[in-house]
Amino acid sequence: MSSKPDNTEETGERIAKRLARAGLCSRRDAERWIAEGRVAVNGETLTSPAVVVKADDVIAVNGNPLPDEEPTRLWRYHKPAGLVTTARDEKGRPTVFEKLPPEMPRVISIGRLDLSTEGLLLLTNDGELARHLELPATAWLRRYRVRVHGTVDPRALERLAKGVTIDGVQYGPIEATLDREQGSNAWITMGLREGKNREIRKVVESLNLQVTRLIRVAYGPFQLGKLPRGAVEEVPRRVMRDQMGAFIKHADKPITRPTPPPERQAFAEAAPKRPPSAKRAREAVDPSAFKPAKPKLSLKGKPGAQAAAKSRLRAAVKEGSGEGHANRRRKPSRPAS
């Protein structure tokens, strides 16, 4: 074991990053804890966050040893409008993290949604995964439903596929499709891979349209589906391995359920919950990521439909084998007049 932390990142990682990965706090909070003298490495209290630690270094926070890293976990959250995506808001507005169920561990968001935007927000306990999925190089498509006010020019939407420059800022290709129009309002589906600050709103405003509602319905292969507003559901680990296997830490390690922090106890009943099911596990992932299944005829809710279908099937089999002709009841012949 090293008696003193090594300050080269080639042999380890920064202490603030290690604390964040352990799920104790954010990197910014870790730096504050270090400045307050609450963090020690190998028995030596740190005074600066510019310290790199290795796997065999002994780290303590407030005299308690650093817990082991938890397996990577991922949640889908249906963010309502009116919440900010930050841990603490300077203006005192309600935040996403205040509304999460108290039994959830400390999580961070993958990307952000602004105050008035609603829809799918991915949450994770793994900061490295969050940073990776936010990078434009990951090329995950973010898909939105946009309600606009004004007259939509379909040709202008098509031109967005080549990218657009607004106020000197270059935006990459955007997939835009006009879904329907009703009077002076319209719904547009838009997909982008960069996700710059307020990109959808700025691009739509450049088309002389006003955004009246903005809903994110998918982030990469994960989709909003029928998740109720304000609800949060964990993505099954099997689905995570299928979609992000190379970035999942400790995939076979059991998950511990920590005691919820006191400040979140008040929100225990705030978010609607649904019991887990295999159907909703499939709903969490965009069907386009998989080979489309053959359509099936649904007979549910139709009285006698299943029995009638089976009867027709048996008749068709008999007809094909010739048995149907032999067993078919013949109509009585009319007597000759």
Image (cartoon, grey):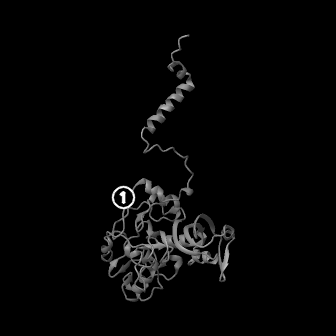
- Residues packed near mark 1 inside 10 Å, few (<14), some (14 to 19) or many (20 plus): few
Q: Relative to 75, is 83 above or below?
A: below
Write the residue at 51% across / 28% down. 315
Q: Relative to 47, is 163 above or below?
A: above
Image position of 240 (left or right of 264): right
Write the residue at 55% across / 25% down. 319
Image position of 118 (left or right of 36): right
Residue sitting nearer the eye, 195 or 229:
229
Residue beneath label 1, please?
Answer: 275
Residue sitting nearer the eye, 105 or 163:
163
Residue 243 x, y percent position in the rendering: 52, 60
Residue sitting nearer the eye, 204 or 256:
204
Label 1 SS: loop
Write the residue at 57% across / 72% down. 148
Residue 224 x, y percent position in the rendering: 48, 63
Residue sitting nearer the eye, 324 or 169:
324
Write the residue at 36% across / 58% down. 275
Furthest toward the top, the residue is 336
Decide if residue 32 is in sight here.
yes
Q: Amino acid at mark 1?
A: Pro
Residue 137 x, y percent position in the rendering: 61, 70
Residue 62 x, y percent position in the rendering: 33, 82
Decide if residue 139 is in sight here.
no
Q: How many labels sit on residues?
A: 1
Specify the quadrant that holds the C terminus: top right
Specify the quadrant that holds the N terminus: bottom left
Q: Relative to 4, is 271 above or below?
A: above
Q: Quadrant of residue 57?
A: bottom left
